[in-house]
Image (cartoon, rainbow, N blue to C red):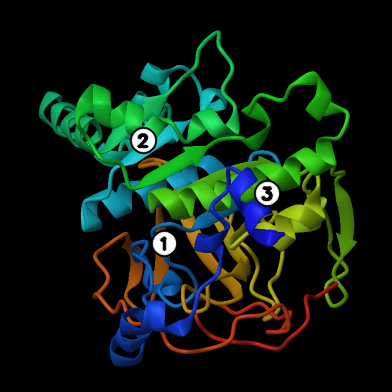
Amino acid sequence: MIDQIIKDNSKDFKTMVHSLSEHKKAIDELRKVGRPKGFHLGFDCLRDYYSILPGKTTYIYGPPYSGKSYMWFEWLINLSEFENLKHGIFSDEMGKPHEVFWDLVQMVAGVNVNYKFHDGSKITISDSDYEKACEFVREYFYIISPQDQELAVDEFFYMPDVIYTKFKAEIDTLTGDPFNEFAVNQVEIRHRDIWVGDQLTKIRKKSDALNIHTCIINHASAQQKVTKKIKDTKQEFEFYPVVTPRELYGGQEWFRKGLGMISIWRPPKGFPDEDGIPALENEIWVIIQKAKPRGVGKLGTIKLYLDHAKHRYYEESAYGKRYAHKIQDDRMAPEREVSASSGNGLPYNGLQSDGELPF
């Protein structure tokens, strides 16, 4: 009977089951060199906490104005500069193609033309720096913009082939920003929670099949500001709290099916971390809430800082500010378990801590 079912079905069921013998060479390679780690993102503090592995996914989310898109753009630029990776970006929310390109050009050049110094003067970009940045962006970035058309998740994954056909370029990453820009038909709207799970499965499978790293940027489904009083100082702070995966629309599906889950949060100025260190005005917390497959990273929080004049990020080190730089290649990941039981403390840029937040 099963033979007849298989014969009448368009799916190739035999390819769905495997024996160890079919994968022995790959297992031998894992034994020899270890599980592969992803590409580093340009900061020492992120080195052990997160990396970008081809064929996998990263989901980024956070409150309004937390810098989700720009943080990801920072990492994409670093991946291009240090690893020669190319990117396709669907980000209609960030503007028309020329506007997104202009943002990238400014970031590559380290210039924010909208920034004003205390005396009211603005930053300018020289002709040579402008052309050099344009050439960099031209080589590594492609913008996907449906304009007056809609783009479904399935169609999103046609884009690598479209980019190759039109520009003869093979991209390494795809960005969808934000998730709610993808088209939903009327039938799917009535079952939106089920639709979300189906789309996340497609994203994971398509990424794996194409060996492309896919990033989806998302908003919280509904979030209100909260007021917190600090125990020791009695200070009160009003802010949007850290977004957790379950606060996304269909959140349980995101948490189950996501591989890399990163919450971006800008603490209010003066808000203390678990060690009582008050947050700076330009401080951003990168909170790794899920890291799979094993070895690409681990749970925890690191701090980066936005240089408003350059619109680039830096980390604080023993030697002061340090902008993105080439990280020594160590693509063999340590064999460690990454799970939600790794602790709720706030690791400060690589230093593990078991303390509690001060409220």
Say whether residue 58 is left or right of residue 105: right
- Upstream in the sequence, badge 2 or badge 1? 1
- Furthest residue in direction top, as rendered: 148
From where the camera sits, is residue 122 visible?
no
- Quarter that holds the C terminus: bottom right
In this picture, residue 232 sits left or right of residue 2: right
The residue under label 3 is 62
At x 58%, y 42%, the residue is 10
Tag of residue 160: 2
Q: Position of residue 145 (x, y in %)?
A: 46, 20
Name the residue carrying label 1.
Answer: 52
Dot 1 crowding, Cα within 10 Å, few <14, some 14–19, many 20+ = many
Disc 1 on helix, strand or loop?
loop
Structural distance between the alpha carbons of marks 2 and 1? 18 Å
Amino acid beneath label 2? Pro
Q: Nearer the viewer, mark 2 or mark 3?
A: 2
Q: Is residue 200 visible?
A: yes
